[in-house]
Image: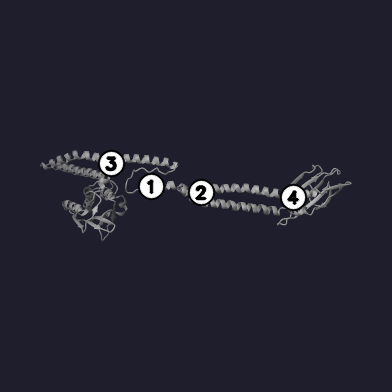
Amino acid sequence: MNTSHWSLTRRQLVVVGGSLTLLAILLGVGGAWFIEDVAERMSDRMLAASVRSITDTIRAERGQVSLELPPGAFGMLEDNARDNVYYSVHHGSRFLTGYRDFPNPVGTGASNGSTGFRYDDYLDQRVRVVTEVRQLPQLRDPVVVQVAETLDERGALARSMLLGLALLEATLVGFAIFLLRPAIRWGLRPVAAVQSQIAARDPDKIDFTPLTTADVTPELSGLILGFNNLLGQLGQATERSRRFTADASHQLRTPLAALRAHVELLQRRSTNDAQQMATIADIREATERLQRLLTQLLALARAEQEEDGLIANLCDARAVIQNLCMRLAPGAAAAGVELHFRADLSFTVKLPAILLEEMVSNLIENAVRYGGAGGEVTVELKRAPDRNVISISDTGPGIPVEHQPLATQRFFRLPRDQHLSGSGLGLSIASTLAHRAGGKIEFVSRTSSQPFTVVIAIPSTD
């Protein structure tokens, strides 16, 4: 049985419930021994009183022993179980009265007034026997009185007491286990409170805000402090990484722009060396790809900024995207792709215009690049009761369903597209900006009746 995945509540229930059950068993064993002892001592006391009432009547006259059997001598032994009572009186080895064949193990060496108890068998029954020896001055041999009783009543008494003990223990254990679950849950409330703090955070946003340590138990305060320390270290490391990406990308733009200018100058000079021209063309293509990568890295760093003032700006989605499509249309036409724009109504987006352009332009450029010559790309704006939608559709092959969960990760590219230019950052930038605007990116797979579509769903701010 694998217990590593048990909940804290279940662990506590098993440990505490098992401990209570073990304790109840130990108490039951000890209680059974004690009950047996109490029942025996109570019954023995009655037997001793019975035999003493007989021995107190023993008299010796002229060497002869006389005694009486008081009416209450055996009456005090009467019980609901109707136990059988046997007795015998001997003077030395001479039988005086009672049951003649009752065993008489006491010899003449017994001390005067001694009382002994033993278990014996008589008439195929187990009996409890009390024996008292009385030595009279006028007699040489002692008088031995024995009273025996079967064990039905003392057994019934022990069983009733054991049953009461068992019922009491079962009630206590059951009541304790019944209260154990709410008690454990109450004890785990601080853990649930910490869990609620963590669960309340936006899963789509990196949040390094420390957890509050107010109203937490001493056992959890150390854990929370350690967790907050880890959050602080992660926040610092993430910020250093972002700053490095932005600074490195920014610093590389100037020398890269100079390199591109020199490459263009070389291309303008006429030369008859085809190999040299091909080399210059390769250098220009690599320079353009590197410049595009740096631009996207800067855009990604800007998209991941958490300054409220930057994200809180609003812009008119229709105006911004329409102007963007007009700028991108010539490049799409040069690639053999028709770019269409449709928008019946406008809506506002919780992003600055420059970031909205960056988000949509990455999706349009992906659609143009991977859609292929002869295809169509349609950018459409729609309004719904609870959200606004920006959709980019293309007639290309789209993204297979099995790869869609990975498509928004940085630098992820489909195996089939490795030979095409691209950095694998376009969808990541668009997804990050969509989350900053409170929305998300969804994919609508291509079918025979509809093109592949990337949908940006943004909550309505109107």
> Label 3 sits on what residue type?
Arg
Is disc 1 placed on a helix, strand or loop?
helix
* Residue, disc 4: 47
* Residue, disc 1: 197
Is disc 2 placed on a helix, strand or loop?
helix
The outermost residue toward the front is 215
> Label 4 sits on what residue type?
Leu
Residue at mark 2 to residue at mark 4: CA–CA distance:
48 Å
Residue at mark 2 to residue at mark 1: CA–CA distance:
28 Å
Is disc 4 placed on a helix, strand or loop?
helix
* Residue, disc 3: 242
Residue at mark 3 to residue at mark 4: CA–CA distance:
95 Å
Q: Are marks 2 and 4 in contact (CB under 8 Å)?
A: no
For label 2, the crowd category at 10 Å Cα-Cα, with few meaning under 14, some 14 to 19 and many 20 or more, is: few
The outermost residue toward the bottom is 449
* Residue, disc 2: 14
Task: Pinpoint residue 436: horizontal percent, then vertical percent.
Answer: 28, 49
For label 1, the crowd category at 10 Å Cα-Cα, with few meaning under 14, some 14 to 19 and many 20 or more, is: few
